[in-house]
Image (spheres, helix red, strand yellow):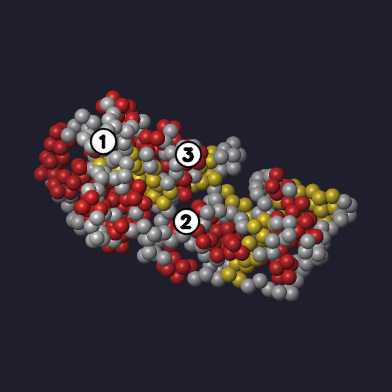
């Protein structure tokens, strides 16, 4: 007897429906075709043990299973449940009525219990698109898949529950989630808050500007000055994620099996890879491509602590994704694209010893050593960082203050208002949403300067020996400062403040 059941394969962050055809005929043998990898080929042992331990059996006949389309490689153990249900249906051990309405996925243990799978959310989205009515999967993934409306999500712990469901002995209870309620529930409760930061008012202001315009930022300062503490709190002042952004972010994390609480991600991601990371781990790839850290930080923040300690090759592969806001990984047989629209926050010590012009520090570095240390970061990468700010240690009297600083929620209101101005400004542009994304053409259109502002910028560039690359960056940042002040024009005050945020462009900064 021939039976068709349906599973799904995930490529990039999109799913493809896989048709599993099971034919049982006279003879003996188990033949699995359709380009399965080693984990899929080994499924017969897991299925046999799981069925035996639940008083069902693998038929002692010739079993031929085809996984179509046959030219797509099938990876992982998540097809165990669909293969097992197909075999039971083809051997009449369960009823196969309406089985074509189901997508079935799950990894079997030898006792018949189910292990969680990766990519439940993209699979559920594809299942709804293609008109499937039900999705059977491990209970641990049910909450994540239930984000998708108009698809019945049936979470199970054991293969017996699936067998009883198809035999109409005991139906599986569907998992239901109110996606919008889930989305708005934790929106205003950030884990880290700016009110915890003592002093550092100028740096907080800098972070607010970076968040308002989506600008990449680098923090330069000695150990213990609070660079990491400030960076961790940046996501808390970014505008709340839209439902579309939340779904897109959850989808990427679902593919690598890293969804938090197996539900919708409502807080913007914050990723902080160690400086020993490889280029593949950072941008994604591998023999079977997976998203890297830059895609896992999509719609959030990527924090690179001690930037000069990262391998130069690792930093160089980041240049193109920073510009294009997506990363494309090409292999001989296929190409996948992962989104990677993130804010880069980097931190670094000003010298190998960690201290710079500090009379209290016993450790000193020569100007040559410091120049060599700073030259580890390439010009083209620095070119993509709009704001450079020096972070100084907080004095004791500020640390011991009882008074709490301004909360993230209050700062976020100003940031959101500035972003709304930018959304309106760039409404006519498809892939332009905030000031940091402006190209030369838009800068010339939206960053017009008065004669007074032009004179100030010209004087500053000449006196401070600012490089040519700093010019456009200053204009972008000044535009954001003007938006925060709800000003249509860029005033000399806005230009003056933006000029302060180009430390590394000043020639003789080390002198």
Residue 301: tell me if it is visible. Answer: yes
Q: Identify which residue, 245 or 273, lies in the foreground.
A: 273
**Which residue was labeled with disc 2?**
248
Q: Position of residue 210 (x, y in %)?
A: 29, 49
Q: Quadrant of residue 467?
A: top left
- Mark 1 closeness class: few <14, some 14–19, many ≥20 residues within 10 Å: few
Residues tagged 2 and 3 counted as in contact (Cβ below 8 A): no
Marks 2 and 1: which is nearer the front? 1
Give SS at disc 1.
Answer: loop
- Mark 2 closeness class: few <14, some 14–19, many ≥20 residues within 10 Å: many
Residues tagged 3 and 1 counted as in contact (Cβ below 8 A): no
Residue 476's place in the image compared with 376, above or below, is below
Total numbered labels: 3
Which residue shows up at 31% across the image and 36% down it? Answer: 354
Residue 8's place in the image compared with 290, above or below, is below
**Which residue was labeled with disc 1?**
361
Marks 2 and 3: which is nearer the front? 3
Question: Marks 3 and 1, Cα distance to the nearest angstrom?
Answer: 31 Å
**Which residue was labeled with disc 3?**
277
Which residue shows up at 73% across the image and 74% down it? Answer: 168
Q: Quadrant of residue 225?
A: top left
- 138 relative position to 267: left or right: right
């Amino acid at each position: 007897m021939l039976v068709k059941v349906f599973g799904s394969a995930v490529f990039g962050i999109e799913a493809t429906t896989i048709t599993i055809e099971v034919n049982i005929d006279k003879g003996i043998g188990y033949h699995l075709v359709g380009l399965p990898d080693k984990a899929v080929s080994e499924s017969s042992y897991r299925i046999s043990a799981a069925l035996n331990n639940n008083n069902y059996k693998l038929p002692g006949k010739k079993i031929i299973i085809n996984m179509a389309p046959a030219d797509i490689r099938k990876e992982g153990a998540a097809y165990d449940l669909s293969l097992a249900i197909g075999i039971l249906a083809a051997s009449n051990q369960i009823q196969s009525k309406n089985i074509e309405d189901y997508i079935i996925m799950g990894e079997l243990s030898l006792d018949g219990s189910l292990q969680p799978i990766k990519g439940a959310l993209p699979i559920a989205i594809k299942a709804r698109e293609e008109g499937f009515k039900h999705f059977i999967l491990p209970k641990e993934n049910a909450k994540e898949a239930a984000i998708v409306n108009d698809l019945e999500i049936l979470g199970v712990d054991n293969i017996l529950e699936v067998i009883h469901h198809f035999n109409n002995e005991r139906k599986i209870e569907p998992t239901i989630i109110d996606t919008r309620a889930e989305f708005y529930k934790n929106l205003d409760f950030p884990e880290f808050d700016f009110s915890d930061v003592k002093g550092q008012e100028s740096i907080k202001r800098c972070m607010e500007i970076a968040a308002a315009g989506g600008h990449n930022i680098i923090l330069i300062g000695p150990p213990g000055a609070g660079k990491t503490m400030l960076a961790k709190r940046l996501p808390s002042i970014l505008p709340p994620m839209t439902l579309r952004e939340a779904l897109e972010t959850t989808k990427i994390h679902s593919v690598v099996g890293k969804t938090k609480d197996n539900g919708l991600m409502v807080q913007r991601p914050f990723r902080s890879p160690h400086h020993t990371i490889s280029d593949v781990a950072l941008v994604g790839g591998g023999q079977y491509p997976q998203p890297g850290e830059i895609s896992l930080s999509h719609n959030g923040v990527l924090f690179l602590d001690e930037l000069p300690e990262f391998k130069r090759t690792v930093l160089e592969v980041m240049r193109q994704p920073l510009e294009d806001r997506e990363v494309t990984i090409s292999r001989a047989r296929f190409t996948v694209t992962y989104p990677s629209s993130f804010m880069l926050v980097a931190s670094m010590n000003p010298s190998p010893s960690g201290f710079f012009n500090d009379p209290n520090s016993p450790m000193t570095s020569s100007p040559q050593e410091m120049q060599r240390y700073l030259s580890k970061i390439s010009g083209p990468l620095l070119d993509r960082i709009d704001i450079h700010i020096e972070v100084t240690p907080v004095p004791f009297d500020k640390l011991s203050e009882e008074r709490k600083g301004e909360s993230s929620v209050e700062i976020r209101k100003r940031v959101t208002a500035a972003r709304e101005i930018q959304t309106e400004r760039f409404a006519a542009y498809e892939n332009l949403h905030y000031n940091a994304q402006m190209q030369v053409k838009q800068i010339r259109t939206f960053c017009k300067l008065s004669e007074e502002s032009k004179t100030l910028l010209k004087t500053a560039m000449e006196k401070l020996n600012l490089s040519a690359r700093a010019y456009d960056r200053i204009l972008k940042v000044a535009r954001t400062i003007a938006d925060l002040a709800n000003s249509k024009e860029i005033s000399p005050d806005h230009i003056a403040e933006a000029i302060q945020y180009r430390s590394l462009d000043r020639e003789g900064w080390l002198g």
